[in-house]
Image: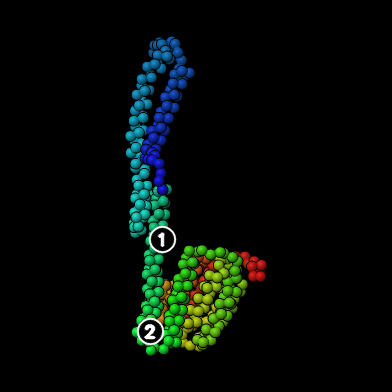
Amino acid sequence: MGRAPGLSVRLKLTLSYAGFIMLVGSLLIAAVGVYYLWYLPEGWIYTTGGDFWINRGMLLRSFAPFVTIVMAFLLAIGLVGGWFLAGWMLTPLARITAATRTAANGSLAHRIRLPGRGDEFGELADAFDIMLARLEAHVTEQQRFAANASHELRTPLAITQTLLDVARHDRTRVTSELVDRLYAVNTRAIDLTEALLLLSRADQRSFTREHVDLSLLAEEATETLLSLAEDHGVILETSGEVTPTVGSRALLLQLATNLVHNAIVHNLPAQGTVWVTTSLHRETVSLTVENTGAQLTPASVSTLVEPFQRGTERIRTDHTGVGLGLAIVDSITRAHAGILTLVPRPAGGLRVTVQLPRQPLQPTAWR
């Protein structure tokens, strides 16, 4: 943004300091003048040490040159001293400005780390360092996610290209088999793209908030995935109470669906169980999804919300899911000012809890 040239802050502070010194000096000299004019007696003064004559007019006339010299000295001291004092005071601001320009050029790793005791400049520098750290982490996360997404999207496209090349060179190949494989690969690419768009929408928090009951969404997600649970030999058990909150119904339904879906498809061995529970607390509501399964370590659990990761291994797009289930859950939770907690169960499997702010339930919202 272009701005018209103006005085620097240092010069403004210098003029302010000098002006204040001149004002104080003028007040002091005026006080002396008032004393001479009103309180100092004029005429003969008789004392034990001798008599002498006081002429107030002569005193004022002889005092004027001295006043002029003093005011000139104060002005010089105010300008020179104010210039150096303002420069010293503005040194932290110069460091902050330099760091801002460095960040504007794309270098987010720079930090001010302003030394000294806490003051307004120190608070500004610390807040700026915190902002840079968060921006750097966000940009790094976005770059890593973009690289992972590009890699995963390239896989179905490469498979499609291979199938088309085979079909072009082998005209005798059964067309129905090729169409089925292309359909499966294309469906996979669509699912991945939709998951990426949903994740982006949650990250940007571009949704309309409304009153919702998290327990109803959990029940809806469970009913939708009931056939999938039967195919995997998994028993679904639901329980809980009304859990009112505020947010996007579509996103929170996706959150519940992803949690239940993950609990079903990663429930090993067969004939396992998934527990879906909602609970109401003083200031929060929570949705907890637990599943039986293999023993997990805290280290492996900590990576589950990373996109395209499952434990310490990378998810390939030819596996069940697209590797974004819990990443989407984490993003939706943060977009709703909630807390996502993943804990390995002692008996094996995983316990996932989503805590969201509690809101008064409005019965008219469910009509």
Q: Which of the 4 quarters of the picture holds residue 312?
A: bottom left
Q: Does residue 132 appear in this view? A: yes
Q: Nearer the viewer, residue 109 or 148?
A: 148
Q: Position of residue 113 (x, y in %)?
A: 35, 54
Q: Is residue 112 visible?
A: no
Do labels 1 and 2 touch, CB within 8 Å?
no
Q: As rendered, which of 173 and 308 lies closer to the eye?
A: 173
User: Residue at horizontal 57%, vertical 75%?
Assistant: 218
Tell me the kind of residue under disc 2.
Ala
Q: Which residue is mark 2?
A: 167
Q: Position of residue 60 (x, y in %)?
A: 41, 17
Kindly identify the amino acid type of the residue bearing the numbered disc 1: Arg
- Coordinates of residue 168 in the picture (x, y in percent): 36, 83
Q: Residue at x 56, y 66 (%)?
A: 247
* Residue 274 image position (x, y, % from top left): 52, 81
For the C terminus, give its image quadrant: bottom right
Q: Is residue 207 above or below residue 105?
A: below
Q: Secondary structure at mark 1?
A: helix
Task: Please tell me which of labels 1 and 2 falls first in the chain.
Answer: 1
- The CA span between labels 1 and 2 is 50 Å
- Residue drawn at point x = 41 percent, y = 89 percent: 174
Residue 134: numbered disc: 1
Q: Relative to residue 147, is residue 79 depicted above or below?
A: above
Q: How is the image coloured?
A: rainbow
Of labels 1 and 2, the one closer to you: 2
